[in-house]
Image (tube, rainbow, N blue to C red):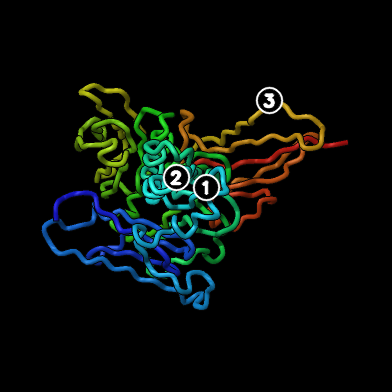
Amino acid sequence: MARAERAARIEGVYMNAEVSINDQLVALHPYGYTSFIVDLTPHLKYGAENVLKVVVNNSAQPNSRWYSNLVPTDPETDSWGNRTHEFNEALDVVGYNYLYWRYDWDGKHFPRRVIAGTETYPSLAYDFWKETERLPFVIGDFVWTSIDYLGESGIGRVTVDDSTPFYVANPWPYHLANCGDIDICGFKRPQSYYRDLLWGLRTAPFLGVLDPQLFGRKLRFSQWGWEPVIDSWNFPGQEGKQTRVDVYSVDEEVELCVNGVSVGRKPSGDAQKNKTSFEVTYEPGTIEVVGYRGGKEPGRTSLKIAGAPAFLRLTADRPEIHSAFGDLAYVTVEIVDQDGYLVKWADPEVSLEETGVGELLAVGTANPVSEELYDTRPNTLKQDGAIIHYAGTVY
């Protein structure tokens, strides 16, 4: 087999599909009403026989009305586009959910059709957006989803060393979907920075670090999920252990350094779909990535270890509020060290109390499995912090 991009397109699976190459799990697809595509390129053994296996588990809902008689089809002979052509002719714009691999074929065979990606996977952001840019009849892309939400519990969750079938909703205490580019408190997650680079809103590389405790373990997430990396170089007690660092970059090459020592220089940008990974040994100090384009350095990004937790930092989104219905402020609560650097690993319980004429309405955390109520005062901070909803008293 020549080394080239290879992918598997799977239609009509109901439901909870697990796709493996040579006994290595490469994709999970919990839903039954969407087709999906799996990039096989990085998992194939070139010059050797490869075994593709798709395991489907519908035991949770075996008698579904969805896809009861639908089998995988070839779009050249029995396409979804042909089957939906008549009613789509009446539409100004046709919304495609999770179907970027159809854009090109349908656009050529239905030249009057204008397409918009109305739901797209975070994990395939590069593929969806590049097709949107390339094809003039595709006018936009809506990711599912921009901001996290309550409900569809855990569709973007990550499991660790767990072979349980990956159902769409996860049992309590999961209550957030955990699939937003932005978490429920309004903080950007790693996939949001990845998308900034993809859209041209950012040029500097981004560093996402895997907790060393997760390195080498079996991590699983659906296409609504994302690798469980964070922009932090703080992992107390994990000194000397291996971990993985993901670099999101549009540069041609990136070089990663730990405490000033290079650990390697690798291709990046389009050649790697804007994500390059390094395996490193965690040691306290500073980690830095330098981007190279045309032999020059357009940008670099670094993370440094924070000191011990020293203060709570409260930041309001406005200087004052008034005694009027609906007027409120959002206050971010963060744990910082002596120098004001964010301490993401600290997760103490924080008690909140208001004085004066205002009223504390709610406290929120982006932890998708937190069992703390939103209207209670004690709250555990997690990574980026928490949000307080504070309102003026109405007389």
Q: Quick one: label 2 or label 1, which is nearer the N terminus?
A: 1
Between disc 2 and disc 1, the foreground one is 1
Left or right of 287 on screen, residue 46: left
Is label 2 in a helix, a strand or a loop? loop
Q: Residue at x 54, y 72 (%)?
A: 65
Q: Quick one: label 1 or label 3, which is nearer the N terminus?
A: 1
Nearer-the-camera pick, 220 or 143:
143
Q: Quick one: label 3 or label 2, which is nearer the N terminus?
A: 3
Tell me the kind of residue under disc 3.
Pro
Q: Which residue is mark 3?
A: 319
Mark 3 surroundings within 10 Å by alpha-carbon count, few (fewer than 14), some (14 through 19), many (20 or more):
few
Nearer-the-camera pick, 208 or 21:
21
Q: Position of residue 316 (x, y in %)?
A: 64, 31
Can residue 229 be seen by looking at this rendering?
A: no
Is label 1 in a helix, a strand or a loop? strand
Q: CA distance from mark 2 to mark 1?
A: 45 Å
Q: Position of residue 98 (x, y in %)?
A: 45, 52
Q: Indicate whether 54 appears above or below 39.
A: below
Nearer-the-camera pick, 393 or 128:
128
Residue furthest to the left = 47
Residue 301 sits in quarter:
top left
Nearer-the-camera pick, 272 or 183:
272
Residue furthest to the right = 395
Left or right of 45 on screen, residue 195: right
Q: Position of residue 44 (x, y in %)?
A: 20, 57
Q: Which residue is mark 1?
A: 94
Q: CA distance from mark 1 to mark 3?
A: 45 Å
Q: Residue at x 73, y 44 (%)?
A: 361
Figure quadrant of the N terminus: bottom left
Q: Indicate whether 387 appears above or below 221.
A: above
